[in-house]
Structure formats: structure tokens, C-alpha cells
Image (tube, rainbow, N blue to C red):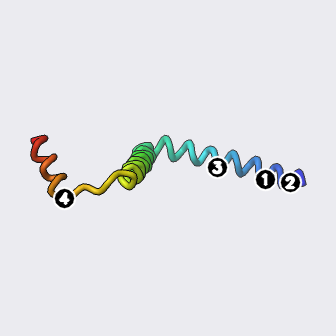
Amino acid sequence: MSNVLENRTELKEIFKAAIVEVLEERGELVSDLLRDILEDAAFIRAIEAGEKTPPVSRTEIFNLLEKEH
């Protein structure tokens, strides 16, 4: 049983080292991934909020956009 525990501890340390290495060497990849996750979460919240509001016609949307510019 202690052999399994030693192997788990060793595996955990190797996994931690690999994560640190990825963060150090591929930080931009991790940043891009986190940005994509946050954008997806924002889109989900926007869609859920939109589902709780009454429908708006395409004409109304374009009228609002024209007023802004």
C-alpha cells in the first residue's frame, strides 16, 4: 500500500512540475485559453438574459444602431 502512495505522490509532483512548465513556456497559450473561456461565459450570460426579454424586430435593432452612429 505504501508503494501506491509513493507512486501517487511522485505522480502528483510530476504533474505539478508539468503544469508549471506549461505556464512558464506557453503562457500566451494559457492566456488565450482563459480569455476564450471568459468570452464564452459572457456570451452564455448574454444569451440567457436575452431569452428572458421580449423579442425585438430586426427593424428596431437597426433603428437603434443608426441612432448610435
* Image quarter (top left, top right, bottom left or bottom right) of the C terminus: top left
**Residue located at (44% from left, 46% from top):** 34
Q: Amino acid at mark 2?
A: Asn
In the image, 58: left or right of 26?
left
| Residue topped by disc 4 | 58
Q: Earlier in the sequence, mark 4 or mark 2?
A: 2
Q: Earlier in the sequence, mark 1 or mark 3?
A: 1
Q: In the rendered structure, which amino acid carries the disc numbered 3?
A: Phe
User: Is residue 16 found left or right of 30 in the rendered image?
Assistant: right
- Counting from the top left corner in percent of width and height, residue 13 is at 69, 45
How much space separates mark 3 and mark 2, taking CA atoms? 18 Å
Direction right: furthest residue = 1
Observer-side mark, 4 or 3, equals 4
Tell me, yes or no, if residue 19 can be seen here: yes
- How crowded pointer 1 is (Cα within 10 Å; few <14, some 14-19, many 20+) is rated as few
Which residue is denoted by mark 2 in the rendering?
3
Cα–Cα span, label 4 and label 3: 52 Å
Tags 4 and 3 touching, CB below 8 Å:
no
* Residue farthest toward the front in the current orientation of the protein: 54
Residue positioned 39% across, 52% down in the render: 52
Where residue 10 appears, x then y in whole percent? 74, 48
Q: Quadrant of the N terminus?
A: bottom right
| Sequence order check, earlier mark of 4 and 1 | 1
Choose between 15 and 68: the one closer to the eye. Answer: 68
Residue denoted by label 1 = 7
Helix, strand or loop at mark 3: helix
Which amino acid, by three-letter code, is at mark 4?
A: Arg
Q: Nearer the viewer, residue 28 or 33?
A: 33
